[in-house]
Image (tube, rainbow, N blue to C red):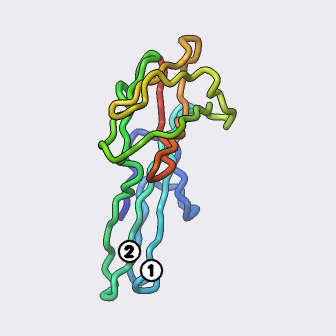
Amino acid sequence: MLDAGEGFSQYFWNTGATDQQLIIQGTDYQAGTTREFSVVGVLDGCTASGKIMLTILENCFIGVDENTADNMIRIAPNPGTGNFRLLMSDDIDVEDVELYDLRGRQVTSALRLEACDGSPCSFVIDQSLKGYFILKVFTNKAVITKSLIIR
């Protein structure tokens, strides 16, 4: 069973399910396959999302493989007021950063990278922007998307 967590008024799983919890049976999938399951929770027009990779083992049990790309980088503080840091391990190099609003419009012009020669990588967002945004971070290992709240 996967649980998206309490507190949302709507849930949208990539399977089409709309409940808080998603029941997965190992026998529903071919042994040796891996499936990605993702969910978006909605509350008052704001969204949060998550995803996980599940591997169906030969004995029909399910193995969980956390999405390691999502865990490569953290944003601090989040929520914040405009000055942020990307925290990551030393083997991660940030190549570019893009900022999007919830309508999918790129608002990167409001973002300025200040220092990005190691961890932490600092960036500033125009003080006029407020709300929920998606930060797309291009690194030497992966492209990572993170939620960002600006107060």
Taking the view exactly as shown, the residue that stands out farthest to the top is: 127
Q: Residues within 10 Å of mark 2 (few under 14, many from 20)?
A: many
Q: Residue at x 47, y 26 (%)?
A: 149
In the picture shown, does residue 24 fall above or below 122? Answer: below
Residue 67 location in percent, x, y?
39, 57
For the residue pair 94 and 29, the one nearer the viewer reads as 94
Q: Is residue 12 left or right of residue 52?
A: right
Residue on which the image places disc 1? 33
Q: Residues within 10 Å of mark 1 (few under 14, many from 20)?
A: few
Q: Residue at x 47, y 17 (%)?
A: 82
Residue 99 image-quadrant placement: top right
Q: Residue at x 35, y 28 (%)?
A: 76
For the residue pair 106 and 15, the one nearer the viewer reads as 106
Q: Is residue 115 left or right of residue 132?
A: left
Residue 5 location in percent, x, y?
37, 47
Residue 55 location in percent, x, y?
38, 74
Quadrant placement of the N terminus? bottom left
In the picture shown, does residue 76 fall above or below 47? Answer: above
Q: Amino acid at mark 2?
A: Thr
In the picture shown, does residue 30 fall above or below 121? Answer: below
Q: Residue at x 33, y 40 (%)?
A: 88
Residue on which the image places disc 2? 55
In the picture shown, does residue 93 fall above or below 20? Answer: above
Residue 106 location in percent, x, y?
67, 32
Distance from Cα at disc 2 to Cα at disc 1: 6 Å
Image mark count: 2
Q: Secondary structure at mark 1?
A: loop
Pick whichever of labels 2 and 1 is earlier in the sequence. 1
Residue 84 image-quadrant placement: top left
In contact (CB < 8 Å): disc 2 and disc 1: yes
For the residue pair 98 and 81, the one nearer the viewer reads as 98
Q: Amino acid at mark 1?
A: Thr
